[in-house]
Image (cartoon, helix red, strand yellow):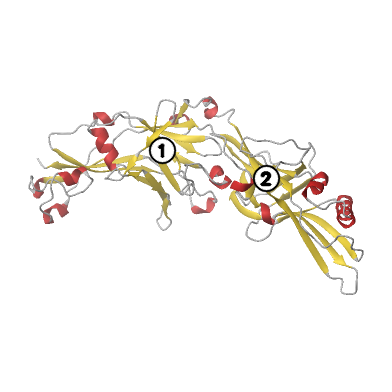
């Protein structure tokens, strides 16, 4: 569909050469054409094909690269189930209990302090804690695909409604285990990390719910085993010591189950599932291994009438499927566009803006004040579309994915960036429609 809009500003401007329009200036051709004879024509009928493709990567999630562990899951009829399990050994802490006879044990508590909660924090979260069969190695690199064996029966278990802003999760260990641990500390049988890990090999943190959409992140340095005791003298002075989760020997495992969903067809990097098969949406999630592929199949056939003067701008507007800011699932801060081959392997970044000298990046923006919640990512790809229209560059497929600004190699640097996700509407989506908005200058008949 083509609509014509009078651009009144052209009446006021003179001396702009035709070259300016090729770099995206809205004031074009006035040195060769009378400005009263120009129209700005918006064109929003360019076809965009979208699909979801598979990203196959092993990403580091161990201690030195992320201070948190994550546990939880996300279940979707379209994308399947993403499950996060946290694993950690326990670090030794110097204390004043050795050879003390005037202290008495109160309790030993597993304390988990929140880093964040992502998803639904209004329903109960069932957390199971399992003992590892052996300690983690402080010298090994662990990835989202790594796993470590743990006991089949939970050592601790608790159902709670997450309260990340008010209080941590606390689970009291059995009194017999606590007393044995306390005795070994006093007697000098546990004096360092090695002897501690012989007693507590570490824990696996597992979501026990059958379904649900919640991820909980816990700060390793502020979480761990907290031992409470008191002095037996008149003052009854209370004390405690925290044996934290190991700062280096911890990681998060991420697994995906797409069985029974349209995306089960994603097996190889070259596979793609059309957004028409997934409720007119496509998906982006590092942790789920999903990215969105875009194609502009007919852009090379862009019809320039004999009235066409130049391209002014080309904006790719992408809208997440989101109802409000209250869903606690913020989309990624920025997205980036890449050119890819038939196997969805990245070839280069798409040039952005009218100059084409920077990568095509778009930030998430929203307007919470309107009668209807609106949000979007808008890419300025004026230079790129101009080159496609002129058939000066090949019309390759594009890959839309997360841009972690803190990562020089384009890889996520935190588990939060991995579990974040966004669902994007395609051109047929009723309320979150994707568009390539082209503005061109033409002469008036």
User: Tag on residue 250?
Assistant: 2
Q: Pointer 1: residues within 10 angstroms few (<14), some, or many (20+)?
A: some
Residue 237 vs residue 411: left or right? right
| Viewer-side residue, 181 vs 15 | 181
Residue 203 vs residue 16: left or right? right
User: In what element is the residue under mark 2?
Assistant: strand
Q: Where is residue 168 drawn, in percent x and y? A: 69, 57
Q: Dividing the image into 4 quarters, which one contains the C terminus?
A: top left
- Tell us which disc is closer to us: 1 or 2: 2
Residue 371 seen: yes
User: Tag on residue 429?
Assistant: 1
Q: Where is residue 343 drawn, in percent x and y? A: 44, 26
Give the answer, above or below, for where 159 lies relative to 433: below
| Viewer-side residue, 214 vs 397 | 397
Residue 34 vs residue 345: left or right? left
Residue 419 vs residue 364: left or right? right
User: Tag on residue 295?
Assistant: none
- Tell me the residue at 65%/35% (across/down): 146
Q: Where is residue 165 drawn, in percent x and y? A: 62, 60
Q: Residue furthest bottom?
A: 234
| Viewer-side residue, 258 vs 247 | 247
User: In what element is the residue under mark 1?
Assistant: loop
Query: Tag 2 or tag 1, which sits nearer the N-term?
Result: 2
Give the answer, above or below, for where 242 lies relative to 298: below
Q: Quadrant of residue 297?
A: top left
Q: Quadrant of residue 380?
A: top left
């Amino acid at each position: 569909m083509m609509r014509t809009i009078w651009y009144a500003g052209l009446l006021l401007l003179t001396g702009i050469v035709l070259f300016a329009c090729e770099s995206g200036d809205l004031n074009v051709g006035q040195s060769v054409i009378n400005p009263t004879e120009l129209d700005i024509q918006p064109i929003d009928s360019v076809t965009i094909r979208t699909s979801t493709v598979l990203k196959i990567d092993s990403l580091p999630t161990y201690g030195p690269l992320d201070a948190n562990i994550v546990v939880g899951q996300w279940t979707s009829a379209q994308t399947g189930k993403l499950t996060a399990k946290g694993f950690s050994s326990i670090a030794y802490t110097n204390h004043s209990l050795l050879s003390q006879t005037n202290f008495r044990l109160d309790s030993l508590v597993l304390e988990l302090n929140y880093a964040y909660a992502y998803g639904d924090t209004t329903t109960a979260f069932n957390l199971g804690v399992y003992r590892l069969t052996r300690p983690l190695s402080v010298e090994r690199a662990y990835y989202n695909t790594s796993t470590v064996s743990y006991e089949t029966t939970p050592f601790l278990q608790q159902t709670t409604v997450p309260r990340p802003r008010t209080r941590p999760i606390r689970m009291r260990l059995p009194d017999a285990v606590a007393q044995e641990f306390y005795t070994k500390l006093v007697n000098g049988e546990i004096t360092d990390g090695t002897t501690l890990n012989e007693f507590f090999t570490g824990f696996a943190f597992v979501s026990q719910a059958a379904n649900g959409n919640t991820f909980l992140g816990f700060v390793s340095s502020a979480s761990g085993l907290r031992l409470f005791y008191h002095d037996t003298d008149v003052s009854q002075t209370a004390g405690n010591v925290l044996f934290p989760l190991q700062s280096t020997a911890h990681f998060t495992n991420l697994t995906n189950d797409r069985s029974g969903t349209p995306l089960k067809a994603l097996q190889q990097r070259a596979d793609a599932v059309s957004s028409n098969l997934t409720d007119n949406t496509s998906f982006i999630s590092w942790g789920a291994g999903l990215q969105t592929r875009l194609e502009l199949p007919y852009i090379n056939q862009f019809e320039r009438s004999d009235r066409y003067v130049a391209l002014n701008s080309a904006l790719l507007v992408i809208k997440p499927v989101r109802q409000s800011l209250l869903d606690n699932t913020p989309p990624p801060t920025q997205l980036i566009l890449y050119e890819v081959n038939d196997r969805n392997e990245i070839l280069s970044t798409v040039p952005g803006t009218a100059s084409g000298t920077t990568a095509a990046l778009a930030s998430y923006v929203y307007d919470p004040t309107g009668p209807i919640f609106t949000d979007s990512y808008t890419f300025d790809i004026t230079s790129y579309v101009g080159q496609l229209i002129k058939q000066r560059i090949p019309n390759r497929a594009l890959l839309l994915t997360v841009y972690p600004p803190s990562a020089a190699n384009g890889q996520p640097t935190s588990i939060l960036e991995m579990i974040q996700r966004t669902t994007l509407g395609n051109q047929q989506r009723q309320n979150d429609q994707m568009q390539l908005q082209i503005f061109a200058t033409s002469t008036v008949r």
